[in-house]
Amino acid sequence: MLGNFTYHNPTRLHFGEQALEELAGELKEYGSRVLLVYGGGSIKRYGLYDQVVEVLKKSGKEIFEVPDVMPNPTVDKLYEGCAAAKAADVDLILAVGGGSVCDYAKAVSVSAWCEEDPWEKYYLRMEEPDNQIIPVGCILTMVGTGSEMNGGSVITNPTQKRKIGHVFGSNVMPRFTILNPALTFTVPLRQMSAGIYDAFNHICEQYFSGQDDNTTDYLAEGLMCSLIVSSRRALKDPKDYEARSNIMWAATWALNTLLAMGKSTDWEVHMIGQAVGAYTDATHGMTLSAVSLPYYRKILPDGLPKFARFAANVWGIDARGKSQEELALAGLDAMKGWMQELGVALDLRQLGVKEEMLEGIADGTFLLTGGYRTLTRQDVIEILRESLEGENV
Amino acid sequence: MLGNFTYHNPTRLHFGEQALEELAGELKEYGSRVLLVYGGGSIKRYGLYDQVVEVLKKSGKEIFEVPDVMPNPTVDKLYEGCAAAKAADVDLILAVGGGSVCDYAKAVSVSAWCEEDPWEKYYLRMEEPDNQIIPVGCILTMVGTGSEMNGGSVITNPTQKRKIGHVFGSNVMPRFTILNPALTFTVPLRQMSAGIYDAFNHICEQYFSGQDDNTTDYLAEGLMCSLIVSSRRALKDPKDYEARSNIMWAATWALNTLLAMGKSTDWEVHMIGQAVGAYTDATHGMTLSAVSLPYYRKILPDGLPKFARFAANVWGIDARGKSQEELALAGLDAMKGWMQELGVALDLRQLGVKEEMLEGIADGTFLLTGGYRTLTRQDVIEILRESLEGENV
């Protein structure tokens, strides 16, 4: 474990098919005014909305609502939520939905009482909150982002073509989260796969960095192995509760700060993926899958021992008779095979990216220094072009 | 992930060579009266006592002390701590030492304001606290128990020959913990090994139970692999900071409730080990190592697939050409080889156990139902006798 760090994750997680029964107990901790935020119609269609509203009413809460939170929440939607939270002076923001809704709830929680433009303060300038923070609770219906147990919040500014994620500290993490794997059964298969790949990539971003022998990397390998096994079961039978519950739990731990403790991390795939997302509004997990393989092939020579270890420990590839490079490449091949089983996007054309967007996407890509290689703008162009030309597939 | 569960671990961990610098910030959260609890002379000998006292004084704290907390804290020592905490009406209990000192601090924290005999209420009857709980902070100097990030507290009643551990909830967990791996350099090698085996066995107790494919078990395998690799480095060079830091971090996660989420757990090795400890006052980790192998050999037929998986995933044993039983046994052999490298006790004679104690130890052993087999009293006798007769070695 390198350097000095602080680990603190106070989110209280209630997990299981009966987890919603814990909501009433949690609500006792807060005042009577609750802002309910959610996305499209699916929580109404499947009855979850009615269940939650019933618990809120029985708990004596006054309900205010911000519906229609979009998959990549925009800065205008953030302003709308801030106005609603402030006008009603709410005591709690309750997010019901996937990672975008949780991200959005956290954005509103730090922004509502911010005295300047929160997009500038908390996203462009990445400052720490110094105003009142409204507590957040989450009821998760889609798996992948890890937003349910971290301080992360991604907001998109379509005019500026910027999609920026701020990872806030433990004071912004959800106070509580309800995780019922059965709620994820209704997610379309394509979304399930995108979420699984998103979670897997969160682990990769933290794993493919550093030269030391770190406990955290062994935990990362365990989570990857579990995701691979359980995703194959879920692909066969999406209602396999055991598989879906393992996926949900692994996805939470994939991005709740644990895997980043005492080590350097990469996050360049997310930087490229977010730049693609700002241009296309494509599903987050798919933007990651479409650029991952060209990116990892590019940095493989700089992190060869780790890629070889990945092949052996995660994909169970026999090292005998292989050079370190052959082993490493066999690992990426195995990963590609699994991505094909999942059906996630392997090329950017599928996501609506066109040749003429490449320069703009490269301009919008932050170049980070934590991974095995710091990319140049030209590297980004090459990665995007390799994906666009379908050389992955 | 099986059943419904709640995960909540609010302990704030400061990790690294400069972690003590975070103490002053933590102290601001509490009133001025601090009860410092610690063990023998080593924290004075190596200067840690003076450093801590200096921070406390600079922070304007009034210091009260309970020194000489023994390795297996007794109920009489608990009464002494309660009287001191109550008389001084302390705002914080600061534990400086190993797991026993942390366990003791938590025992005093729930017991000081208890209106009846805390041994009866919190240990014999295992009730949940309903009185004021004094906050606890820890500065850890020895690795193994995981007490720094859990609600566990083991107290021994030598008169009754009972050693009982109560795992309290998150309201009793340390509010903060300082983990500086360099502080563990001065621990004698035998203690280091006992601590490593203690941590490893904590993982085993949670791993060897259940038939499902659970994310938690993959995390357990990762932690075991890391402990094995890092312990071998630490045996060669006890001042290898990287190795000692990985051991410290793995030991914390081995027993901070994560590995028990959504699955059944065993804990029978601890039950037998604690019964041995009540008779002999032997080092906790050594009581576990001395009974582990006979115990696992006895339950192996009942949990064969898990023991085979353990051999392949933790010890890297090639499954080809082996029956499941041969593979499983090869895993235990590999574990025995590693225990011999560590130099932990493999037979009870080393710990001062004599034939005539066996019946009493068996009487003092709780028989739990979470593992692959529920032992009978006769099973316990056989396990103890196998260890006593040195059939391990």
Image (spheres, coloured by chain):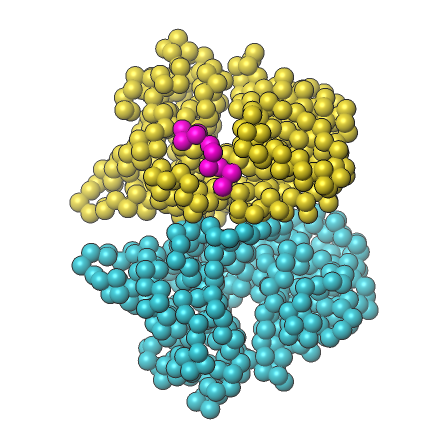
Chain colours: A yellow, B cyan
Residue at the image point whose x is 32% and y is 57% from the top: B309
Residue at left 74%, top 62%?
A: B130
**Is residue A190 highlighted in magenta?**
yes
Residue A48 appears anywhere in the view: yes
Q: Residue at x 70, y 42 (%)?
A: A27
Residue for point 74% across, 70% down = B82
* Along the viewing direction, whichever of A330 and B32 lies nearer the viewer: A330
Q: Which residues are magenta?
A: A182-191
Compared to B239, does A80 lie above or below?
A: above
Along the line of sight, the residue nearer the viewer: B286 or B131:
B131
Q: Is residue B370 above or below residue A42?
A: below
| Overall secondary structure of the magenta section | helix
| Total marks in image | 0
Q: Is residue B92 magenta?
A: no
Q: Residue furthest top?
A: A356
Report whether B368 appears left or right of A34.
left
Question: In this rendering, would B379 be left or right of A99?
Answer: left
Horizontally, is A243 left or right of A160 in the view? left
Q: Quadrant of residue B148?
A: bottom right
Q: Nearer the viewer, residue A305 or B317?
A: B317
Give the image location of residue B122, x and y in percent: 67, 70
Camera sees residue B13: no
Classify the position of the C terminus of chain B by image quarter: bottom left
Q: Position of residue B163 (x, y in %)?
A: 58, 76
Q: Residue B390 location, x and y as percent?
A: 35, 81
Q: Residue B199's spot in the image, x, y percent? A: 47, 62
Picture quarter containing residue B233? bottom left
